[in-house]
Image: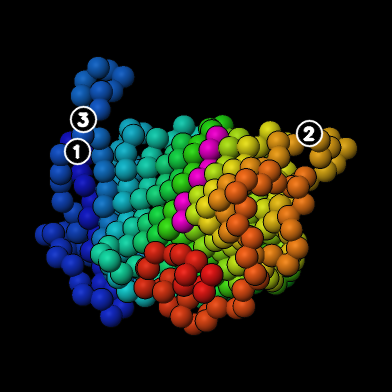
């Protein structure tokens, strides 16, 4: 029988959680029956699952890496779920959990525990597995040489109640996005980004995007953004969907006066992009299509927009988006940034009203 490993650490200013019996080596272990899995020999195996209850900055990286390696050895290649549970509090270093197997069947869940999010003020988050979920986490004021969140998956990725606030790509020669989702292992994963904030992030070079989806060794089959706010980012573009097959933006709010080019940059002619609901405000250009010797503008599927409130100084060119039920309104002034950012830090659901839209 495989074991369920539980690490209980202590967070900055947070209340320590209950601990299982200690082994005397600083790592708490306990056994638990998990879902069965039939192996190649026809015998039922126990599906291993690990939960790490983390609440202490100083021990976040070293003990977590050691325990993950032990967990990987314990699961013996079986499908498994590895969970990092973060108590509410402030963390000064990031998380790196990477599954290196090309045939990965590992699911990784990193989640803040309770109604208040876990807040990272240092380091980055790098997660690599078949399936990844990042939930109830805030990245606040972090400067890093490369992307602040980098996720590499084969099957699916979910960002749920994640806020990235005031982040900086600090290497002036780096073009990495603020948040990167990569399709790997030859898979065709799906991505769901819901109830997320991307606020006042920037790249020193200026070439980055706030959110970019990259192909890796695979291609995303479907990407959905649901109730997401992009506001005040200083980047070249806001969202690069990459060579995805279908993208839906539902109730997404863009307030991006400092984005130097189009909010959305489409580089894959077969991409089907739909925008419904939400608000687009204070942008220089909404969408642009990559034209080259290999792809003419006429090769692209024109994006479709329904029921979106558009608050721009100039109308959207009809060749850029098929506009249905367009709600044109005056361009708004800047929001109260301290109030908006505080709402995101508290884990509140994003909406345009918080931006005065």
Q: Which residue is mark 1?
A: 34
Q: Is residue 86 visible?
A: yes
Residue extending farthest left: 21
Predominant secondary structure in magenta?
A: strand
Residue ID at (15%, 44%): 32
Of residues 292 and 15, the one nearer the viewer is: 292
Q: Within the magenta stretch, is there residue 183?
A: no
* Disc 3 to disc 1: CB gap under 8 Å: yes
Residue ID at (18%, 67%): 17
Residue extending farthest right: 293
- In the picture shown, does residue 41 fall above or below 320? above
Which badge, 2 or 1, is on the more N-terminal residue? 1
Residue ID at (36%, 61%): 136
- In the picture shown, does residue 275 fall above or below 353? above
Q: Which residue is mark 2?
A: 299
**On-image quarter of the C terminus:** bottom right
- In the figure, is residue 93 to the left or right of 38? right
Separation (CA) of disc 2 from disc 3: 49 Å
Which badge, 2 or 3, is on the more N-terminal residue? 3
Tell me where residue 38 appears, x and y as whole percent. Answer: 25, 23
Q: Which residue is mark 3?
A: 36
Tell me where residue 160 appears, x and y as whole percent. Answer: 40, 55
Tell me where residue 354 appears, x and y as whole percent. Answer: 46, 72
Of residues 309 and 158, the one nearer the viewer is: 309
* Disc 2 to disc 3: CB gap under 8 Å: no
Which stretch did the figure color magenta?
A: 221-227
């Amino acid at each position: 029988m495989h074991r369920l490993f539980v690490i209980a650490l202590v967070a900055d200013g947070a209340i320590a959680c209950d601990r299982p019996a200690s082994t005397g080596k600083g790592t708490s272990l306990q056994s638990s029956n998990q879902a069965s899995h039939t192996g190649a020999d026809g015998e039922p195996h126990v599906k291993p699952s690990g939960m790490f209850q983390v609440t202490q900055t100083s021990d976040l990286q070293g003990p977590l890496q050691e325990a993950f390696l032990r967990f990987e050895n314990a699961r013996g290649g079986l499908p498994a779920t590895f969970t990092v549970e973060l108590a509410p509090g402030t963390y000064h270093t990031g998380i790196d959990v990477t599954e290196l197997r090309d045939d990965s069947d590992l699911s990784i869940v990193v989640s803040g525990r309770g109604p208040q999010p876990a807040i990272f003020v240092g380091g980055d988050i790098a997660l690599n597995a078949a399936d990844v979920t990042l939930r109830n986490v805030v990245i606040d004021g972090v400067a890093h040489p490369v992307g602040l969140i980098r996720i590499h998956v084969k099957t699916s990725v979910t960002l749920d109640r994640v806020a990235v606030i005031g982040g900086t790509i600090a290497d002036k020669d780096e073009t990495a996005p603020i948040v990167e989702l990569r399709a790997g292992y030859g898979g065709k994963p799906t991505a769901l980004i819901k109830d997320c904030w991307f606020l006042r992030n920037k790249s020193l070079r200026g070439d980055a995007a706030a959110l970019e989806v990259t192909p890796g060794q695979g291609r995303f089959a479907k990407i959905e953004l649901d109730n997401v706010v992009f506001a005040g980012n200083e980047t070249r573009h806001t969202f690069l969907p990459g060579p995805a097959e279908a993208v839906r933006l539902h109730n997404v709010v863009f307030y991006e006066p400092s984005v130097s080019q189009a909010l959305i940059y489409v580089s894959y002619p077969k991409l089907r992009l739909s925008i419904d609901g939400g608000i687009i405000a204070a942008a220089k250009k909404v969408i642009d299509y990559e034209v080259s010797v290999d792809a003419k503008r006429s090769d692209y599927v024109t994006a479709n927009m329904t029921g979106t409130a558009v608050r721009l100084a100039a109308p959207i060119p009809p060749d850029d988006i098929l506009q249905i039920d367009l709600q044109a309104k005056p361009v708004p002034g800047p929001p109260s940034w301290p109030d908006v950012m505080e709402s995101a830090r508290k884990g509140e659901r994003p909406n345009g009203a918080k931006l005065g839209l």
